[in-house]
């Protein structure tokens, strides 16, 4: 997001404000208005949620449902826990 905004600021450049009589560098909200692209993070989260809805609707007999709902058994590894797919849903 930071890189995208930096590139967009270079593309659109500063604008001359007639009221104040000075150059204004566009803020993030103005950049988003100028460049109407969907937010990548929001889009990926919505698609993950949509897929999770499909998996929940599959039922107990499907493997994808078991992977999403069930917990693994066994000894925990040392160190920071690995990031799970379900952690990125919310």
Image (spheres, rainbow, N blue to C red):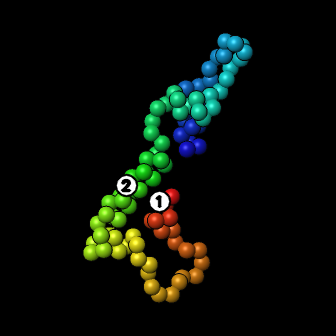
The residue lying furthest to the left in this view is: 61
Is 13 placed above or below 41 here?
above
Q: Earlier in the sequence, mark 2 or mark 1?
A: 2
In the picture, the disc for residue 89 is 1
- Quadrant in the picture for residue 30: top right
Asked whether 39 or 8 is in front, the reply is 39
Left or right of 26: which side holds 75?
left
Q: Is label 2 in a helix, a strand or a loop? A: helix
Where does the image place residue 12, in percent across and percent down from the top left?
Answer: 55, 26
- Distance between mark 2 and mark 1 Cα atoms: 10 Å
- Quadrant in the picture for residue 7: top right
User: Which residue in the structure is indicated by mark 2?
Assistant: 50
- The answer to whether residue 63 of the structure is visible from this angle is no
Is 49 placed above or below 75 here?
above
Where does the image place residue 51, in percent across and percent down from the top left?
Answer: 35, 58
User: Residue sitting at 46 percent across and 32 percent down?
Assistant: 36
Q: Is label 1 in a helix, a strand or a loop? A: loop
Left or right of 55: which side holds 18?
right
> Do callouts 2 and 1 mark residues in contact (Cβ within 8 Å)?
no
């Amino acid at each position: 997001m930071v890189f995208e905004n930096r590139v967009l600021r270079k593309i659109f450049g500063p604008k001359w404000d007639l009221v104040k009589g000075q150059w204004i560098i566009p803020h993030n909200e103005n950049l988003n208005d100028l460049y109407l692209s969907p937010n990548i993070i929001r889009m990926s989260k919505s698609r993950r949620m949509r897929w999770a809805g499909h998996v929940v609707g599959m039922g107990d007999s499907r493997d994808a449902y078991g992977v999403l709902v069930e917990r693994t058994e066994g000894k925990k590894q040392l160190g920071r826990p690995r990031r799970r797919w379900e952690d990125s849903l919310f």
